[in-house]
Image: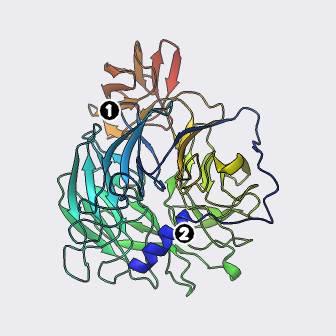
C-alpha cells in the first residue's frame, strides 16, 4: 500500500509530455466573458504541489492545503484572500502528520478539519483540527489498532464531510478488516469509529475520495478499484449512517469500459436529485468520463474525454449558480497541462481554459483539485505544478456569474441557527426564507447569522443588501 501511495504522489507531480498535441502556448478561452487570473505562486517555503480543493470560510477567506513544502517539507495549511494575499498557517513535520492531500471542511463550531495521508504517531496518517487563525490539534492517528491497521490507514483525497448528527465522515485508502480501505466517522473531539470496511471484489476497494450526505440522509461515494466485473474498475456506493454498505454500480460493466473506469473523485448531488462525478479512465477514448447516477444506481455516461479537450479528470464537480457543472482535468487539452471545463446536466461540454497557455506554464499546470465557487460568483482552484516556481498555483476564473449567498447548512427546523456566507453584506436590510421574513444579525461583511422563522417553507433564501438582492445558491430545506 505504501508503494501505491508513493506512486500516486509521483504521478500527480509528473509533468507529462504531449509533443503531438502541443500546438502552441497561447491562451485558449472559449467564451468571451471569461477572465483567468493566477493569484499566487508557491515556492516550496510556503508550500508546494497542492492537490486538495479550497473552501471559503465564514470570514471570507479561502483555505487550503499543499501536499509538500513548508518548513519541514511535509505540507502546509494556508489561507488566501480572493485577491491573492496568502498566509501560511501551519506546516506539517511528520509527527503531527505529513502530506495533506485532501481539502478542508469548516465545521459548525467554526474550525477547519482535514486529514494527512501519512505521518502521525503510527505513520498511517491523521485527522486534524485547525482554527481559522492557525492553531492546530491532531485529533487521531491511524493504525492505532495494530500492524493490520483495522482502523484504517492513508486517508488520501477525501475531504471530510460533517453530517447532520455533527460527526465528520471520511475514508481511508488502506487498512480496515480487508486491508482495502474504510469508511470512518469521528466526532469533533477526536473519538473515531470505523463504520465499514471495503471488501474489493463486489463492494469495491481503495476509496480515494470522500463522501457526500444526500438529502435522504444516506452517504454516497466512490471506490477507485474493485467491483463486480473483474476489471478493478471501481464502484459507486451508498452507506447509511449506521454502516449498511450497498454497491450501486460497478464500472467496466460495458465492453472496453466505455462506461468509465477508476473514479478518483467523489460525487456531488445536484439540484435535480441525481449525483454527478468523473472517472480518470475508460470512456469511449480511454481518457476518462463525466457521469450521472441516480440515487438507486442507474448510471449514464454524459461525456468521454479525448485528450484534446482534457484527460484524467481526478477531481469532483461543483454545480454553480447557473445550474451547470464545472470541473478540471489534470492533463490533456490544447497544451497538455490540463483544463477547466463546464458541462451541462445533459452532457454538453465546453472547455473554458487550457493550462500551460503561457510560456513555461507560468499560469499553472496539472490541476489535481476541483473548483469552488465563492460567493463573489468566481471560481477558485489550485494547480499541482507550473507557476513561476513550478511548485503550483492558486487561480481564479470569472465566467460572468453574479454574487450569491450560501448557507453553511442547507436544512434546518424552525428556530434553528443558520449562518449565511456572502460578500459585502454590511448594511443588509432584509433576510427571508422563501418569502418568510427572518430576524438577523450582520456579523461581518462576509457573515450573517439568523434563525429559521416561523412559517418558513423550503426554497431560496434572499438577502437584500445595499447593492441589490442576493439569493442562495441552493434551496434551503425547512425540516418538520
Q: Nearer the viewer, residue 413 or 153?
A: 153
Looking at the picture, how far across and down is residue 14, in whole percent?
58, 66
The residue labelled by disc 2 is 11
Locate residue 463: give its quadrant: top left
Name the residue nearer the viewer: 209 or 268. Answer: 209
| Among numbered discs 1 and 2, the one appearing first in the sequence | 2
Residue ID at (71%, 63%)? 305
* Camera-side mark, 1 or 2: 2
Residue 123 percent location from the top left of the image: 27, 71
Q: Are marks 1 and 2 in contact (CB under 8 Å)?
A: no
Q: Using residue 112 as the reference point, say whether residue 402 is left or right of it.
A: right
Badge 1: residue crowd in 10 Å (few <14, some 14–19, many ≥20): some
Quadrant position of the C terminus in the picture: top left
Looking at the image, residue 1 lies above or below residue 97: below
Query: Which of the image's four quarters has the N terminus?
Result: bottom left
Residue that badge 1 annotates = 418
The kind of secondary structure element at disc 1 is: strand
Figure disc tally: 2
Residue 40: percent from left, percent from top? 52, 40
Amino acid at each position: 500500500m505504501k508503494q501505491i501511495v508513493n506512486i500516486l504522489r509521483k504521478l500527480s507531480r509528473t509533468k507529462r509530455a504531449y509533443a503531438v498535441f502541443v500546438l502552441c502556448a497561447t491562451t485558449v478561452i472559449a467564451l468571451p466573458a471569461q477572465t483567468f487570473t493566477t493569484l499566487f505562486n508557491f515556492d516550496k517555503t510556503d508550500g508546494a504541489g497542492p492537490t486538495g480543493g479550497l473552501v471559503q470560510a465564514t470570514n471570507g477567506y479561502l483555505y487550503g492545503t499543499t501536499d509538500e513544502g513548508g518548513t519541514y517539507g511535509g505540507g502546509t495549511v494556508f489561507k488566501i484572500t480572493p485577491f491573492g494575499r496568502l498566509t501560511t498557517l501551519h506546516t506539517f513535520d511528520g509527527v503531527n502528520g505529513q502530506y495533506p492531500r485532501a481539502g478542508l471542511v469548516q465545521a459548525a463550531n467554526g474550525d477547519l478539519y482535514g486529514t494527512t495521508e501519512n505521518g502521525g504517531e503510527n505513520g498511517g496518517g491523521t485527522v486534524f483540527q485547525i482554527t481559522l487563525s492557525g492553531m492546530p490539534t491532531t485529533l487521531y492517528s491511524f493504525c492505532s489498532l495494530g500492524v493490520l491497521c483495522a482502523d484504517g490507514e492513508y486517508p488520501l483525497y477525501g475531504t471530510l464531510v460533517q453530517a447532520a448528527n455533527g460527526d465528520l465522515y471520511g475514508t481511508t485508502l488502506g487498512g480496515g478488516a480487508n486491508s482495502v480501505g474504510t469508511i470512518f466517522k469521528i466526532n469533533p473531539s477526536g473519538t473515531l469509529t470505523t463504520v465499514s470496511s471495503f471488501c474489493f471484489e463486489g463492494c469495491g476497494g481503495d476509496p480515494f475520495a470522500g463522501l457526500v450526505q444526500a438529502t435522504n440522509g444516506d452517504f454516497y461515494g466512490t471506490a477507485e478499484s474493485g467491483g463486480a466485473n473483474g476489471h478493478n474498475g471501481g464502484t459507486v456506493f451508498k452507506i447509511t449512517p449506521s454502516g449498511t454498505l450497498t454497491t450501486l454500480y460497478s464500472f467496466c460493466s460495458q465492453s472496453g469500459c466505455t462506461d468509465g473506469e477508476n473514479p478518483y473523485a467523489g460525487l456531488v448531488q445536484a439540484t435535480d436529485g441525481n449525483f454527478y462525478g468523473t472517472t480518470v479512465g475508460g470512456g469511449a477514448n480511454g481518457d476518462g468520463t463525466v457521469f450521472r447516477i441516480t440515487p438507486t444506481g442507474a448510471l449514464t455516461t454524459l461525456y468521454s474525454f479525448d485528450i484534446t479537450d482534457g484527460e484524467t479528470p481526478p477531481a469532483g464537480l461543483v454545480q454553480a449558480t447557473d445550474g451547470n457543472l464545472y470541473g478540471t482535468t489534470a492533463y490533456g487539452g490544447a497544451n497538455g497541462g490540463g483544463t477547466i471545463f463546464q458541462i451541462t446536466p445533459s452532457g454538453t461540454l465546453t472547455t473554458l481554459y487550457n493550462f500551460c497557455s503561457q510560456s513555461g506554464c507560468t499560469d499553472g499546470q496539472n490541476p489535481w483539485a476541483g473548483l469552488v465557487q465563492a460567493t463573489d460568483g468566481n471560481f477558485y482552484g489550485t494547480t499541482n505544478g507550473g507557476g513561476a516556481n513550478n511548485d503550483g498555483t492558486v487561480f481564479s476564473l470569472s465566467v460572468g456569474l453574479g454574487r450569491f449567498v450560501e448557507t453553511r447548512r442547507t436544512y434546518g427546523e424552525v428556530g434553528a441557527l443558520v449562518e449565511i456566507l456572502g460578500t459585502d453584506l454590511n448594511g443588509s436590510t432584509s433576510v427571508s426564507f422563501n418569502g418568510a421574513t427572518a430576524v438577523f444579525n450582520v456579523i461581518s461583511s462576509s457573515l450573517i447569522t439568523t434563525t429559521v422563522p416561523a412559517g418558513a417553507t423550503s426554497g431560496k433564501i434572499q438577502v437584500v443588501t445595499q447593492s441589490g438582492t442576493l439569493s442562495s445558491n441552493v434551496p434551503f430545506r425547512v425540516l418538520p
